[in-house]
Image (spheres, rainbow, N blue to C red):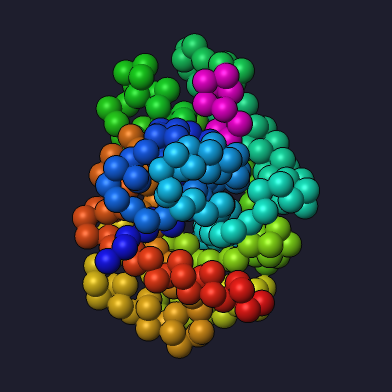
Amino acid sequence: MKRIDLHIHTTASDGTATPEEVVREASRIGLAAIAITDHDTAAGYERAAAEAEKTGLEVVPGIEISTKYGGAVHILGYYIDVASPALQEVLDWIVHDRDERNEKMCELMRADGIDITYGEMRERFGEVIGRPHFAEILIERGLAKDMRDAFDRYVEKGRKYYQGRHFLSIERSIELIRAAGGTAVLAHPFQYRLDDAGLRDLIEHCMESGLEGMECRYSGYDAAMSGYLEQLAAEYGLLMTGGSDFHGENKKDIALGDGRGGLNVPHSFLEQLRARRGKS
Ligand code: AMP
Ligand code: ZN
Ligand code: FE
Ligand code: FE
């Protein structure tokens, strides 16, 4: 069976592998297709696509947008037009909002004697900077032992360096993905800790805004969990997608294409996604 991975972060956001490295690794392990789904940016796609020309790997342009719906809900977008001005305008706003939040986090750290400027972080980590990058600095400076420790003690909500940022609504995110020609998919449905009724409410709310798919296979979801999601997707007429949420060294236990082991996302998921797009 041809396998794929439709949920991948690169150095364009908070992954540690470059788009080129991701493509080479995906080819090496024999994946048939991947999607680059960085947080709030599509900047990694062109680089991945250029590298993939050497290997024949299929690369789908994607994005992952964080929204607020009670708690956090993530929406994936596939086959977005990465050059869409409407998309770029909103992504620029998100990056600007991140910058403001990040400057505040930097100041709190500096006030504690940690010698780091936001300019230095921008230089080193690029445009879309998130809390995992702050965690990386804290680990480097010997203030935390690993990512989890850094989040638990410093950058998780309520901890000393945490600062909030603003989020798009679910409606706005899905509309944006659609306006950029993309297909909107609900990411990792079990991460929101909803019961069956809560998840159905969320799905129905998203579908009112134009949701077309749901991520049914994901790192750590066992056969029973994926089976339940696939049944829900079928019931609602949603496409099924799947991916690892690979972040390189920032999520060491997640392997490209394989997740926490046995991920198995079939190429048929992508074929169905393309078939649906062909009809609309
Ligand atoms: P930000 O969007 O910059 O506030 O950072 C959120 C990102 O940090 C998420 O997308 C996750 O990748 C990561 N993250 C959030 N909570 C944790 C945690 N407890 N441990 C490790 N990574 C986390
Ligand atoms: Zn991330
Ligand atoms: Fe996510
Ligand atoms: Fe993700």
Residue 191 pos. (x, y %): 40, 61
Question: What is the quadrant of the N terminus in the image?
Answer: bottom left
Quadrant assignment, res 233: bottom left
Residue 196 place in picture, x, y as percent: 40, 80
Q: What residue is at 29 percent from the left and 31 percent from the top?
A: 146
Image check: 157 left or right of 149? right
Seen from the viewer's position, the closer of residues 76 and 139 is 76
- Relative to 83, is 137 above or below? above
Residue 187 placed where, x, y %? Answer: 47, 62
Residue that protrudes farthest toward the left in the picture: 261
Residue lying farthest bottom? Answer: 235
Q: Is residue 149 left or right of residue 169?
A: left
Position of 123 relative to 253 (above/below)? above
Q: Quadrant of residue 207?
A: bottom right
230 up-or-down from 167: above or below:
below
Residue 79 in which image quadrant: bottom right
Range of magenta residues:
121-132
Q: Nearer the viewer, residue 196 or 51?
A: 51
Q: Visible in this render: residue 242?
A: yes
Q: Nearer the viewer, residue 122 or 151?
A: 122
Q: Is residue 217 visible?
A: no
Asked if residue 103 lies in the magenta stretch, the reply is no
Q: Residue at x 46, y 15 (%)?
A: 114
Residue name at image x 64 percent, y 52 percent: 167
Q: The C terminus appears in which quarter of the rendering?
A: bottom right
Q: Which residue shows up at 66% across the image and 38% down it?
A: 95
* 231 left or right of 182 in image: left
Task: Count every numbered label the image shows and give the total.
Answer: 0
Q: Residue 214, percent across and down?
A: 47, 70
Left or right? Give the position of 204 relative to 240: right
